[in-house]
Image (cartoon, rainbow, N blue to C red):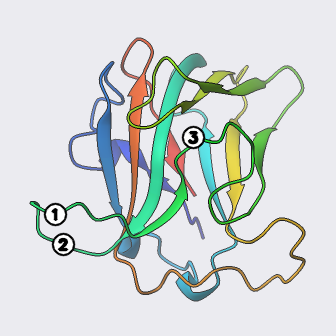
Amino acid sequence: KTHAVNCIVVPNFYNGATTNYQEVIIPLGVFSGVDLQHLKQINIIFDQIEASSGTIYLDLIRFTSLSSPYSLPLGLIVDCFNDGIFTNELGGGSGTMSGAQGATINAQFDPLNPYEGLAALKLTYNRANAWVGYWTFMREAGDTDPVGRDVSGYTDLRMRIKGAVGGENLKVE
């Protein structure tokens, strides 16, 4: 059973990223089979659904609840990338991963392209007919408790995304 959501099916993201920031809102209900009371990590994956290489910028990853379109739903901020370190706002570690030799992904903090604040996360990837991705733990660094974080009180996972050339796409697991 898959626990991934292809962002290509998210409204306003049918053709992938644009060169301007878009807010991607993923209803948590689409993650069938995921125990939202014990969420351990979030993965951003680049695989066979998009071009083999590209660059994407991420900013302000957070869990929110339904709210008026006129309010700013901050919710539970996972990472806003303003501190320039690979520890998220929850204290959990973050990093990159690849599924085969030759597949590469580079993560860096880019102060020239933030949606808000001081920096965005810039992911430059070449998946070489495999997959590559970025992960972030939903628990404090050094915490060995496998339980994870309870996000069942939220309705959405939101993030700001833009591509370097447009059309870049991804999956969220």
- Say which quadrant the C terminus sits in: bottom right
Q: Name the residue carrying label 3.
A: 82
Sort mark 2 into few (<14), some (14-19) or many (20+) by Cα contacts within 10 Å: few
| In this rendering, position of residue 109 left or right of residue 141 | left
Marks 2 and 1, how far apart in space?
7 Å
Provide the secondary structure element on which disc 2 rests: loop
Amino acid type of the residue tagged 2 in the rendering: Ser
N-term-proximal mark, 3 vs 2: 2
Residue 45's place in the image compared with 141, above or below, is above
Q: Residue at horizontal 59%, vertical 46%?
A: 44
| In this rendering, position of residue 94 left or right of residue 171 | right
Which image quadrant for residue 160?
A: top left
Q: Name the residue carrying label 1.
A: 71
Q: How many marks?
A: 3
Q: Residue at horizontal 74%, vertical 62%?
A: 92
Amino acid type of the residue tagged 1 in the rendering: Ser
Image coordinates for residue 37, horizontal then vertical, percent: 57, 88
